Image: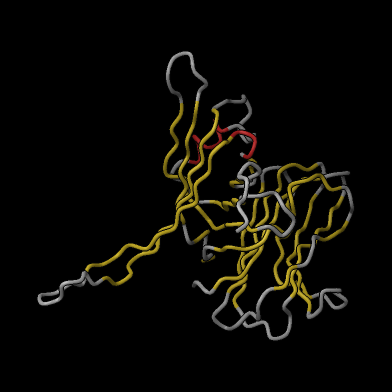
Amino acid sequence: MAVEKFWDAGIFYDGRNYTGQTNKVTVSRKVSMLDTSVFGIETKINLPGQDEADISVSGWWYAQDTVGTNAPDPVLFNAMGGAGAPLLVYPKNADLGVAYFYPAVEGTFNFFGAFGELAPFNAEFHYAQQLGTTRVPQCRGYLGLQPTARVGATGNGSNQLLTTISATDWLVFTVHLISTDATNVVFELESDDAAGFSTPVSRMTTGALTATGQSYIGTLQGPIATDTYFRVKWTRTGGTTFTAVAAFGETALP
């Protein structure tokens, strides 16, 4: 049995990196149970009800004067009860490591504590299912780009072999642009039928992301007949460097 040391997690919400401000993250998924028990049956009978997905993060509160920074306050304070935004969490900062992501709305933001102690904060996020007119399922996928500075005008992450994308499967792709001095950066999810990517096909694109703190999440429903390898590609215009984190995966959930 391989036991993981939980110390290198990542937390990103709406293009902001909260990794350096948090020291606890909990991913929760559950299905409510509907009791269908009747007379004459000694054992309780259940049917599955609604699916719930929640992510809670905790850490140390601090504020910066400029709205839009990675500080827990004021960004999370102002995001309370909003329309929702992409949320990405991973347990280990590893190339193609497991990642969890979906659109989420912030439902709770608690902060401050006892006299003489460090000021804490806690935020709770809940699955929002839909951003605008786009319905996005919850996804357990892969970390396609780690949040490190990149200087190339174009490049790509490592490729990951997925199962065949059937008509009932969805591809999900998300990006958080943590910092940039570029005019714009475009991210694509590419596929190919071989690991060498000699004939890549662009499946989803963010369009031009032009500023620090922008994010994207999108879906593509199958089928995809032959391609089973996927990777993230970027193209930068202007500037010299950017930092972004990206993830992708497949799910059978509608």
On screen, residue 12 above or below 121: below
**Residue 203, image x, y percentages:** 71, 72
**Residue 192, image x, y percentages:** 78, 77
Q: As drawn, which residue projects farthest toward the front?
A: 1
**Left or right of 90 in this view: 55:** left
On screen, residue 20 above or below 96: above
- Residue beneath the point at 79% across and 53% down: 185
Q: As drawn, which residue projects farthest toward the top?
A: 116
**In front of the other: 2 or 131:** 2
- Residue beneath the point at 61% across and 39% down: 18
On screen, residue 120 above or below 232: above
**Residue 234, image x, y percentages:** 80, 58
- Residue beneath the point at 65% across and 81% down: 164
User: Which color scheme is applied?
Assistant: secondary structure
Q: Quadrant of residue 68?
A: top right
Q: Quadrant of residue 51?
A: bottom left
**Which image quadrant: the N terminus?**
bottom right
**Left or right of 100 in this view: 180:** right
**In front of the other: 151 or 66:** 151
- Residue beneath the point at 53% across and 65% down: 136
**Left or right of 241 in this view: 12:** left
**Residue 220, image x, y percentages:** 62, 72
